[in-house]
Image (cartoon, coloured by chain):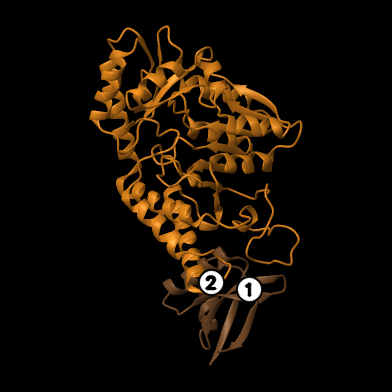
Chain colours: A orange, B brown
Amino acid sequence: MTFLDSAATTLIKPYEVYRAVNMAVRTMASPGRGAYRAAEAAAEAAYECRRCAAELFGVDSPEKVVICFNATHALNIAIKTHIRPGDTAVISGYEHNSVLRPLKAAGARIQTAASPLFDAGAALEAYDRLLRPGVRAAVINHVSNVFGFILPVGEIARLCRERDIPLIIDASQAAGTVETDMTSLGASFIAMPGHKGLYGPQGTGLLLCGGSAEPIIEGGSGSNSRLDEMPEWLPDRLEAGTHNMPGIAGLRAGMEFVKKTGSANILRHERELLKQTAEALRDNERIRMYLSDDPSLQSGVLSFSVKDMDSERAAAFLAREGIAVRAGLHCAPLAHVTAGTDAQGTVRISFCAFNTKKDVERLVRALKKIE
Amino acid sequence: MKYYLIAARSLTYGQRMARALKNAGMTAALVRSSGENGCSYSVRIKEGSLAGAKRILAEAGFGAAEIREEEG
């Protein structure tokens, strides 16, 4: 199988991740629940995961790195910390349902800073117009999971700081490739999955916390058991229940891989494959690609449509050819409305550090056969 | 032998305390302990190390903590 769906999850992991997961399953109990070796091993592994994330993302203390089940869990915490019914939230035109649905559930009045695809200047202007007194929080999808559009998070973060509006960054497609630094961004929260660009197992995510947060799950925290509420301090406040130690150990190994390889190098590799794809498909009259004129505004994610063919049928054809892609609305209907692709959706290919030129060649050959 | 237990508010906080002390060359172990609110964590150091530990922890930004004696 040629796996080109890393924006969903990186199916191919570094060997160290498999080894770490195996080791954890066999040797780690639950952190903070015992004074014996297996519990201490788990505690050490969890701390190292937080420490590694703190270094990778510019967080000043490992305690401010909260381990979650996925980015959706992390975003729910962030959004429900800030938003109460009737509060105004400003979002981009490219948000995922992991932002839209919690905002709706929290009763937010949503204002969309809509902007054309791959127009960073327009995105910044749109946020500038809407970030006014009375806005309770701003949310931004750092990199669109549909189009790979890299939004101007740094400039928008600056506006939020200047206007004292908490910013929640969805780094689901950015973490591991596009630079994400808590210290310089000064965000209230940065949420990310462990299983995409950080090459960890599914069932992991991280929430980087710039301040206090409200729990959405209450339960055992392994400490202060007589308290009938979750502890006030991080990370305990947001981590109820038994930790996913195989996932956490694997996530740490994945992040060490990203640190060793260099996120900029991974992004450069993915962009080269995207460029190879674009050049090879340029003359295929049935394929319409959504490409940025400025490569610096696009990550290793490419959406395209096939003329006169529903995106799901195109993806099914590619699957029969042994090529894994995603199709439809990608859990991001707003992004499709913004870009004008909501009628049919798109086929999306997304690269990872382990894809090669041969993968692109197989894709291009298959697309030539599509009817 | 006498030890001192320096209370930590959480496992992660205690891990950070222990590392700050170890990085400064001090012998320190994170242990489970019983606190006012039930299970908690403490960093255990040897008798004679208390003054140095307090100084190192203060310099590293840790706030004042409850300290208990324990016979080892």
| Residue A252 coordinates in the image, percent (x, y) | 42, 53
Label number found at residue B57: 2
Q: Secondary structure at mark 1?
A: loop
Three-letter residue code for mark 2: Leu
Mark-to-mark CA distance, 1 and 2: 10 Å
Q: Quadrant of residue A225?
A: bottom right
Mark 1 touches mark 2? (CB < 8 Å): yes
Is residue A314 visible to the viewer in this orientation of the structure?
yes
As drawn, which residue projects farthest toward the front? Answer: A320
Identify residue for label 1: B65
Circle 1 packing at 10 Å, graded few (<14), some (14-19), many (20+), is some
Which element type, helix, strand or loop, lies under badge 2?
Answer: helix
Q: What residue is drawn where x is 35% and y is 23%?
A: A320
Q: Position of residue A273 (x, y in %)?
A: 28, 28
Identified at 63% across, 44% down, the residue is: A77
Instruction: Name the residue type under label 1.
Output: Ala
Q: Residues at marks 1 and 2, common chain? A: yes
Could you classify mark 2 by the number of other residues whose Cα lies within 10 Å: few (under 14), some (14-19), or many (20 or more)?
some
